[in-house]
Amino acid sequence: MEENNNFMDKNTFLAIALSILFFVGWQYYVQKKYPQANKQAQAQKAKEASSQVPQAALASESSVLNPEQAVSSLPQRDEVKLRYENSELNIEITSRGMGFSQIELKQFTNRANEKIQFLMSDQKANFATFYKDKVVDFDLKRESEHVFLGTALIENTTLEKRMEFKPQLYTVDITLRVVGEKNGNLGPLTTVLSDQVLKVKSSFFMPSFEGTEFFVIDNGSEERVRIDTEAKFSQNFTAATLTSIGSQYFAVALVEQSELIPSADVKFDPSSSFAVAQVTHPQQSLQSHGIKITGFMGPKKYDLLRNLDPQFVQMINYGMFSVLSKPLLSLLQWLYSILNNWGLAIIALTIFVRLLLLPINISSMKSMKKMQKIQPQLKAIKEKYKDDPMRVNQETMALMKREKANPIGGCLPMLLQLPVFFALYSVLGQSVELYKSPFIFWITDLSYPDPFFVLPIAVGGLYFIQMNITPQPMDPAQAKVMKFIPIIFSFFMITVPSGLTLYFFVNTVFGIGQQLLFQREKKKATA
C-alpha cells in the first residue's frame, strides 16, 4: 500500500480550520472579556506605528484640499488644541489652520441618541485656513472667554486670525488680516467646510427628506445640490456670498461679510463619504480690506437664522411656495405656544387650513355634481353626432351653458389648493422644531416615519372611503386607476415624517366629513 505523503490532505485541512476557528473565537472572547485592555493595545500599536513614520513622509500625505494631491501642512510648531464650550456648543479648536476639529451641538441628538456633530474629513477641520493648498500653522491663544487669537508667519508676512463666538446664536465671527508690513506677494486664502454625508435611500414613490446637500448663494441666485452618495461630484461657484453643507435640520455654513466676494468649490467623493466646500478669497481682500466671515454651526431654525442674517434663512428648503410656507410656520409656532404639543398644533393647523379653503371645496363639489348629472346627456350627444365632431362640441357647450355646468369648475378649486398643500408639505418636512418631538403613544418623533405604519395604513383606508363617497368619473378606465390611488398613497406615506402623515390623516377625516355633510344637504334640497 502506497503511503500518502500529501501535506494538504483532509486531516491537515481540518486541523488548520480548527486552529483558525479557535484563534478567532479566543480573540473574540478576549475583546468581550477585556474591552479596555484591547483598546489600549490598539492605541499602543497605533502610537508605535506613527513614531516609526519619517517626518518627511508626514509632509507627503494626501492633500487637505484635494485628496488626490500631496499635502504640506507647514509643521512649524507642535499642534495646540483649545476647547470652547457654551450652553449650545462644544468645540475643539486646533492650531492647524485655526479650525474646529470637533463641533458638537449640546442641545440635539441624532436618531441613535448621540450628540449631533459636524465631522472633519482627514485634516479638513471646519473653518480652517489654507494658503497655496497648505494648512496654515497658527500660534493659537485664548484672548478672553469667547475670543481666540492666532498668528502665523507666511512668506515674511504676519497673518492674524481672530474668532469671536456669539453665545446662544451658534455663530462665530472670523476675521483675517495682515499685520505689520504688508507683503504684496501674499496670495489668496481658502477656508474649508466639511461634514459626513448621510446615506439615505430615496425614490419617487418612496421619498425621504433625510440626506445631505450643498447650498450656495452664487451671484444672488440659490444653488441647492442634494448629494448622491453613489456619485462623485464637483462644482465651482464664482461669487459665493453663502456656502453651506448640511441636512434639512442642521448645517455648517459661512456668510461673507467682506467687500470682495470669494469663489467656492464644492465636492464629494463616495470613497471618502465626506462633503467638502472650499471658499477662496481673492488676494485683494486680504491685502486691502481683510477677510470677514460669519460662521454658523447649528439647527436651521427659521427665527434664529432670520435674526442672524437673511441669507441664512435661505438654507431652509421651503420650495417654490416659500412665500406661503413662512406664514404657515409662524401660525404653527403660535398654535404650539398655546397647545404645547407639536402634534396637536399640526391638527389645529390642518383644521384651520381646511376651514380657510372650505368655500373653494364647496364650489368644487358643486361643479363635480353638475358634471356628473349631465354625463348621460353628454354621452347621448356623442352617440347622436359621432360623425360630426364640430356638432358634438356645439351641443356640448350649449348643454353646459343651459345646465350652468363648468368642466373646469371641479379642477380649478383643487389647483388653487395645491400651493397651500406644497407649502404645508415643506413646512412639516423641513422644520427642525418637529425634530424628535413626541406626539402620543407610539409616535415619539414627528420628524421620523411612523415606526408601526399605523398612520400610513389609516390614511390609505380613509382615502379609499373618501373616494367611494365622492362623485367618480364615468370613464371606466379612470375609475379603475382611481382605485389604486389609496394603495399608492399608503406606500408614499410610509417614508415621510409622521408629522406630515398626521396632517394627511386629519385632512382626509375632515374631507370625508365635509363630503357627507354636502350629500346630506343635497338630499334635503332634493326632498
Image: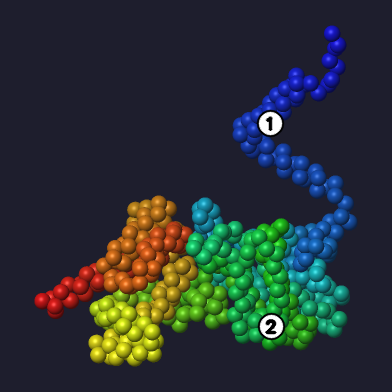
Look at 10% across and 76% down and name the residue there.
527
View extreme (top): residue:
1
Residue 472: tell me if it is visible.
Answer: yes
Q: Is residue 428 above or below residue 449?
A: below
| Label of residue 24 in the image | 1
| Label of residue 239 in the image | 2
Q: Which x, y percent locates residue 51?
A: 83, 47
View extreme (front): residue:
387
Which of the two discs, 1 and 2, labels the residue nearer the N terminus?
1
Tell me the crowding category of disc 1: few under 14, some 14 to 19, or many 20 or more residues within 10 angstroms, Cα based: few
In what element is the residue under mark 2? loop
Q: Give the tally of numbered discs.
A: 2
Q: Please state which amino acid type lies under the numbered disc 2.
A: Ala
Look at 40% across and 75% down and name the residue there.
421
Q: Please state which amino acid type lies under the numbered disc 1.
A: Val
Q: Which x, y percent locates residue 45?
A: 77, 41
Quarter of the rendering containing residue 526: bottom left
Look at 72% across and 26% down and name the residue there.
17
Quarter of the rendering containing residue 127: bottom right
Q: Are marks 1 and 2 in contact (CB under 8 Å)?
A: no
Q: Which x, y percent locates residue 432?
A: 47, 67
Residue 345: tell me if it is visible.
Answer: no
Tell me the crowding category of disc 2: few under 14, some 14 to 19, or many 20 or more residues within 10 angstroms, Cα based: some
